[in-house]
Image: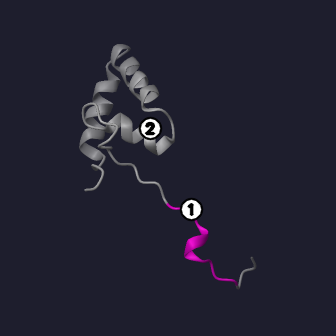
Amino acid sequence: MNETTPLRKDSFPPLKKLVRTRDERMVAGVCGGLAKYAGIDPVLVRLGMVALVIFGGAGLLLYLAGWIIIPEEGA
């Protein structure tokens, strides 16, 4: 493309949106939403969150912050 060719809206990939999932939910859907956004298995995110809880307690604070900040899917 040169500088005079306008960009088409359909030439960009769709934007991913971080949301708390309903189908991958165990408590509030935070780990499922993060996993869907990153394209990884939700079990890996949950294990990482548990490790953060056990080794310092930061996982609980991060989960609560995600529950408050990340919007629910479909909202």
Query: Which residue is at a point 49% across and 41% down the rendered structure image?
Result: 38
Query: Which residue is at a point 26% across and 39% down the rendered structure image?
Result: 67
Return the residue at label 1: 13
Residue 64 as seen in the image, left or right of residue 35: left
**Residues marked 2 and 1 touching at CB (< 8 Å):** no
Q: Is residue 7 magenta?
A: yes
**Dot 2 alpha-carbon crowd within 10 angstroms: few under 14, some 14 to 19, many 20 or more:** many
Q: CA distance from mark 2 to mark 1?
A: 19 Å
Return the residue at label 2: 35
Helix, strand, or loop for circle 1?
loop
Q: Is residue 36 magenta?
A: no
Residue 31 position, x and y percent, is 36, 34
Query: The N terminus lies in which quarter of the figure?
Result: bottom right
Q: Earlier in the sequence, mark 2 or mark 1?
A: 1
The structure's colour scheme is one colour
**Dot 1 alpha-carbon crowd within 10 angstroms: few under 14, some 14 to 19, many 20 or more:** few
Residue 45 position, x and y percent, is 43, 29
Q: Which contiguous range is marked in magenta?
A: 5-14
Residue 43 position, x and y percent, is 43, 27
Residue 46 position, x and y percent, is 39, 26
Image-quadrant location for residue 7 = bottom right
Circle 2: residue type? Ala
Above or below for 23 versus 9? above
In front of the other: 21 or 38: 21
Query: Which residue is at a point 58% across and 66% down the rendered structure image?
Result: 12
Image-quadrant location for residue 20 = top left
Circle 1: residue type? Pro
